[in-house]
Image: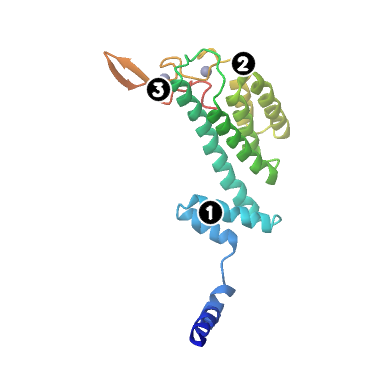
Amino acid sequence: MDGREMKVRATPKAALSPARLCISIVAPTKVDEAKAALDQGDFERGLRLVEEAEAEQPSDPAARELYVVTHLARAIRLSDKAREVRRQDLLRRKIEYDVEFQDSPGVVESFDAATAAIEDVLRVDSKHWKAQMLKAALLFRRDRETGRPAALEILHALAAADPTNQQVPFTIRKIERPCPRCGDTGFCSHCKGRGQTTFLGMDRKCERCYGRGICPACGVL
Ligand SMILES: [Zn+2]
Ligand SMILES: [Zn+2]
């Protein structure tokens, strides 16, 4: 019994050995740890550490910057994923590309996740123009009818805030009018969003959209 207690106590003592103390004094900050995790390709752990660092020290510029960069990357990924989930869903449901459709719950969920990811960035840096651009693109991507005016409002505000940014007016020109190339569906009209065409009974990658199934003119947004 005594022996066991000794052993139990021995563990915390060992943790406080001089060598361990030294390490904890020069311990890397959460931001450093997050960077290391991201460098190693452990994106999920990196994100978690960045979130902790930002929550603990919201005024630390390094934590803020890393938070914005990583969460913007995440938002871009989720935004692309939402579009792809929708495309796959429409193919599965055999919905013709120029037919009105309602998103299925899985697609709605994907778009919601992407929207939330962008809001995560804007919560920390509300003026971040790339995040604003992405928000506009996602609104437009999700529902052109309601998304177009909402996206244009964001883009016009960005253009007013920084008239030297050429990417903003370029995007405005792209989305302000319905796309004639795809009938404003956002999908590749050549392969009808399949990403493949059939020639002599064989499926092959659509050369107009490089197999992505999205309109080369407007779908890239
Ligand atoms: Zn195509
Ligand atoms: Zn188009």
Relative horizontal placement of residue 208, taking residue 144 as reference (left or right) = left
Residue at which label 3 appears: 195
Q: Position of residue 151 (x, y in %)?
A: 66, 26
Q: Position of residue 26 (x, y in %)?
A: 57, 72
Name the residue tied to disc 1: 46
Ligand 1 near label 3 (Cβ, under 8 Å)?
yes
Residue displayed at 69% across by 29% down: 154
- Spatial CA span between label 2 and label 1: 40 Å
Q: 10 Å neighbourhood of mark 1: few (<14), some, or many (≥20)?
A: many
Residue designated by label 2: 177
Mark 2 close to ligand 2, CB under 8 Å:
no
The residue at 65%/37% (across/down) is 129
- Of callouts 2 and 1, which one flags the residue occurring earlier in the amino acid sequence? 1
Mark yes or no: residue 125 visible: no
Q: At numbered mark 2, what does the secondary structure look like: helix, strand or loop?
A: loop
Which residue is at the front of the view, 2 or 94? Answer: 2
Q: Is residue 59 left or right of residue 50?
A: right
Q: Image quarter for residue 59?
A: bottom right
Q: Nearer the viewer, mark 3 or mark 2?
A: 3
Q: Helix, strand, or loop for circle 3?
A: loop
Q: As shown in the figure, which amino acid type bears the numbered disc 3?
A: Gly
Name the residue at 61% across, 25% down: 140
Amino acid bearing label 2: Arg
How far apart marks 3 and 2 lie (CA) works out to 25 Å
User: Visible in this render: residue 82?
Assistant: yes
Residue at the limit of the structure toward the front, as seen here: 1
